[in-house]
Image (spheres, helix red, strand yellow):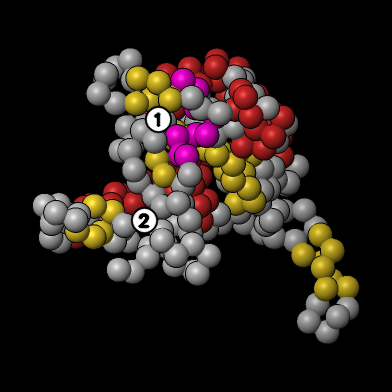
Amino acid sequence: MSSVGPVHLPLSQNPDSPEYHRFLSSLTREKVDSFLPVRCPDEESNTQMSSLIAEYRDKKDSIGGTVTCVIRNVPIGLGEPCFDKLEAKLAHAMLSIPATKGFEIGSGFKGIEIPGSIHNDAFIQDPNDPTRLATRTNYSGGIQGGISNGQDIYFRVAFKSPATIGQAQDTAKYNGQQGILEAKGRHDPCVVPRAVPIVEAMAALVIMDALCIQQSREACRSALPALKQPVGLKTKEAKDGSERIPETAEKKGQGEVFGDE
């Protein structure tokens, strides 16, 4: 849990800072759960958030907040470059949770203030595995072009203040006349602490779906015969008949990529 009302987890308002990335890398589920019931992994912020929620509870009012999720050890290559981008699937899942009002991944809205020369995540050799590539920074949040790049995926989800509160509120009756709405019983003054495991579960479902889809693609590919040449590339025999070489575009301007013999 990264914020409640105006109280924010330190560094969470600067998702582009290296310190924030190092902080996210240090988090574990055990550490987050040790700060129950609010689940904010910072002692001072956790206390302030608890007090703020109690304040709104006592006023029979409610308050919203945000949840940050970090997904580690994601395989490279999950997702698609267009309609089923991995970040789009994550956003779809998160915004399907009741009370959600916003989703941002990586540098998010803060990224619009960062020039491209800095925001671009340059590829480097992975210092932990020389057979792989990594990125020097992670402004993209672990997904580039809709496809996971092997870096940590991190995003933030906003939850609105619960609508059902104990205060009397104006409303309209079925006949259009003015009425009063005043909820009775027990209602959460803030749903964000309860949302933490829900966000985690939804994220796990999305990643597992993407993994199963990718594995099905690989299984289908292994069942097909190997291509003798790249798709869409016509060839013709060399004059001596000893080999086949790619044809050139002999009919330029006639709407054909390759010429016919």
State how far apart marks 2 and 1 are (Cα).
41 Å
- For the point 40% across and 30% down, which residue is it? 151
Q: In which quarter of the image is the C terminus?
A: bottom left
Q: Is the magenta stretch mostly helix, strand or loop?
A: loop
235 left or right of 175 in image: left
As displayed, is residue 245 above or below residue 130?
Answer: below
Magenta residues (range):
136-144
Please state the horizontal and vertical placement of residue 77, each as a whole percent of the image.
Answer: 34, 43
**143 falls in the magenta region:** yes
Please name the amino acid that badge 1 sits on. Answer: Gln
Say if residue 24 shows up in the picture.
no
As displayed, is residue 98 above or below residue 181?
Answer: above
73 left or right of 3 in image: left
- For the point 55% across and 20% down, which residue is it? 20
As displayed, is residue 154 above or below residue 234?
Answer: above
Please state the horizontal and vertical placement of residue 110, each as a whole percent of the image.
Answer: 67, 32
Please state the horizontal and vertical placement of residue 170, each as a whole percent of the image.
Answer: 84, 63
Q: Which residue matches tag 2?
A: 248
Say if residue 256 shows up in the picture.
yes
Q: In front: 61, or 207?
A: 207
Number of other residues with Cα within 10 Å of mark 2, as a class: few under 14, some 14 to 19, many 20 or more: some
35 left or right of 49 in image: left
- For the point 20% across and 54% down, which residue is it? 238
As displayed, is residue 217 above or below residue 74?
Answer: below
Q: In front: 232, or 147?
A: 232
Between discs 2 and 1, the one toward the N terminus = 1
- For the point 44% across and 57% down, which residue is it? 84
The residue furthest bottom is 175
Q: Which residue matches tag 1?
A: 151
Element type where label 1 sits in the image: loop
Please state the horizontal and vertical placement of residue 42, each as a whole percent of the image.
Answer: 54, 19
**7 falls in the magenta region:** no
